[in-house]
């Protein structure tokens, strides 16, 4: 029995294959130009030369690819920049123009990761004496594209320029930019801290590291970058400190409050800033939070504020109900932030033992939540005079405090700058060698700090 051939299906399939091959051919031609094999070969040639730092040898093949198949590879632009920077280094007066052109074409043909690209472009302009306006233009484009992709120094420089330009004419813009910059810094810190924690886990487990991971260890990549980001957080706060006061903020926000009652982003940022500046006792803050809660009832951040307001108003039952809801719905990060906030309130009330319990709970949710260790250190230092009847015993409480600071920095290097300020103070209160000798103690021996601290430390 002969099988009947469906000629209609065959014709349809043939047409589909013809169209597919045609589209693929057009796509390849669009990417590699009219001479795809030469394009691929030349990319390989100049890339190998650039890797060997043979920039002059790479120039001819790179130039051909740059002109004839600009969409073929990102290497055309990353390697082209290395070639052009080498020319600039060797005194070529036209090299900076070429660098600017390469960046522009890279963005045209590969419009990805633009926060970093514009930020890197700004670095070149800064290094080569471009005007403040030219640099700010690129920094602003980087910020608008992806602020988290900007370098540590460029984030700081960008915000400093915004403050200088607008602090006397547009305070709102300064505050809005501050919020966005701080969010970008927090995002970078969060991502980097997580990567650092994963790397430390591999090291502690004795696992082999990739070349990239080993390079990061050898060059203290995370420690340096997280330390720099930590400094930026302090620097940003310092820049807005003089203009961000309750007397200035509340009238400013009242003017635009009615227009933003349904703007969740505005409500959240305004609440966070007022809270940070200690304005939470003002009736406007309470009104703001209640309105935010009405507009966004499932947002965990507004529920935290509402819980705190209820507790301050003596509405303990409602506060406890909200606290349970917050804890149940939160991610590990949310839980850590929430119980840390509770630890801060207990610390401010002088209830140090309860505060430490909450701080430890924060670390149980997020092991690299270094702020909790710093809070415990501050409790220990404040308890020094009451934790022992003799000078030596009191001073050893500062050793326990210093140990917590070291622990905070170890799990989160972004806290290094802040932690070192506390360490300088605590070390100045350690028992000195004369005191240790006169008491017949031995440096390095164990000592248990008394009272509620109850921790064993080493004598310095």
Image (spheres, rainbow, N blue to C red):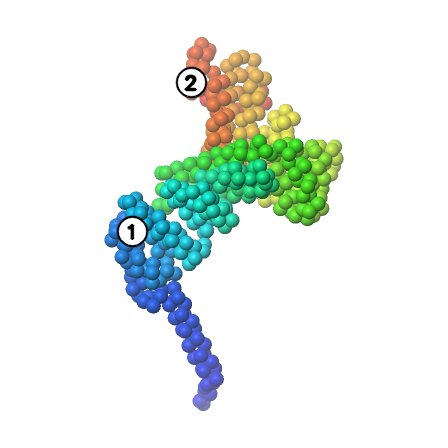
1 and 2 marks in contact (CB < 8 Å): no
Residue 172 relative to residue 84: left or right: right
Residue in the foreground of this view, choosing between 312 and 119 = 119
Residue 441 placement (x, y as % from top left): 44, 14
Residue in the foreground of this view, choosing between 380 and 439 = 380
Residue 43 placement (x, y as % from top left): 31, 58
Q: Residue at x 45, y 15 (%)?
A: 432
Q: Residues within 10 Å of mark 2 (few under 14, many from 20)?
A: few
Residue 56 relative to residue 355: left or right: left
Residue 151 in view, yes or no: no
Q: Which mark is residue 233?
A: none
The secondary element bearing badge 2 is classed as: loop
Residue 208 relative to residue 170: left or right: left
Q: Is residue 324 above or below residue 281?
A: below
Q: Which residue corresponds to mark 2?
A: 443
Q: Residue furthest bottom?
A: 1
Residue 232 in view, yes or no: yes
Q: Earlier in the sequence, mark 1 or mark 2?
A: 1
Residue 428 placement (x, y as % from top left): 47, 19
Residue 253 placement (x, y as % from top left): 66, 40
Q: Residue at x 30, y 57 (%)?
A: 62
Residue in the foreground of this view, choosing between 273 and 177 = 177
Total marks in image: 2
Residue 125 relative to residue 305: left or right: left
Q: Which residue corresponds to mark 1?
A: 50
Q: Residue at x 57, y 32 (%)?
A: 241
Q: Residue at x 45, y 41 (%)?
A: 132
């Amino acid at each position: 029995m002969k099988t009947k051939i469906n000629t209609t299906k065959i014709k349809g399939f043939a047409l589909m294959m013809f169209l597919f091959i045609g589209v693929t051919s057009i796509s390849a031609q669009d990417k590699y130009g009219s001479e795809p094999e030469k394009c691929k070969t030349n990319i390989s040639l100049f890339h190998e030369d650039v890797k060997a730092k043979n920039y002059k040898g790479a120039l001819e093949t790179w130039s051909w690819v740059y002109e004839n198949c600009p969409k073929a590879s990102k290497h055309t632009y990353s390697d082209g920049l290395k070639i052009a920077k080498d020319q600039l280094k060797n005194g070529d007066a036209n090299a900076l123009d070429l660098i600017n052109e390469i960046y522009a074409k890279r963005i045209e043909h590969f419009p990805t990761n633009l926060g970093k690209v514009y930020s890197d472009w700004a670095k070149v302009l800064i290094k080569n004496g471009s005007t403040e306006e030219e640099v700010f233009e690129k920094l602003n484009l980087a910020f608008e594209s992806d602020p988290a992709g900007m370098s540590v120094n460029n984030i700081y420089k960008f915000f400093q320029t915004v403050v200088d330009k607008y602090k006397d004419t547009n305070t709102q813009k300064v505050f809005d930019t501050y919020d966005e910059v701080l969010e970008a810094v927090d995002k970078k810190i969060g991502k980097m801290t997580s990567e650092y924690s994963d790397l430390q886990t591999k090291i502690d487990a004795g696992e082999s590291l990739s070349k990239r991971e080993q390079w990061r260890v050898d060059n203290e990549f995370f420690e340096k970058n997280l330390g720099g980001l930590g400094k930026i957080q302090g620097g940003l706060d310092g820049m807005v400190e003089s203009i961000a006061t309750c007397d200035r903020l509340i009238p400013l926000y009242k003017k635009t409050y009615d227009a933003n009652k349904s703007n969740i982003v505005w409500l959240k940022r305004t609440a966070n800033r007022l809270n940070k500046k200690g304005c939470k006792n003002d009736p406007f803050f309470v009104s703001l939070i209640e309105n935010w809660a009405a507009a966004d009832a499932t947002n965990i951040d507004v529920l935290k504020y509402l819980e705190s307001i209820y507790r301050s108003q003596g509405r303990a039952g409602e506060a406890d109900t909200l606290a349970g809801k917050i804890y149940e719905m939160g991610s590990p990060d949310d839980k850590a932030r929430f119980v840390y906030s509770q630890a801060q309130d207990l610390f401010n009330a002088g209830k140090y033992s309860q505060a430490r319990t909450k701080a430890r709970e924060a670390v149980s949710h997020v092991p690299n939540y270094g702020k909790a260790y710093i809070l415990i250190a501050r409790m220990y230092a404040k308890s020094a005079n009451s934790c022992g009847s003799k000078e030596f015993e009191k001073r050893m409480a500062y050793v326990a405090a210093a140990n917590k600071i070291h622990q905070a920095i170890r799990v989160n290097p972004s806290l290094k700058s802040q932690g070192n300020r506390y360490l300088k103070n605590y070390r100045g209160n350690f028992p000195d060698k004369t005191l240790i000798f006169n008491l017949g103690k031995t440096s390095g021996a164990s000592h248990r700090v008394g009272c509620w601290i109850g921790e064993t430390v080493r004598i310095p």
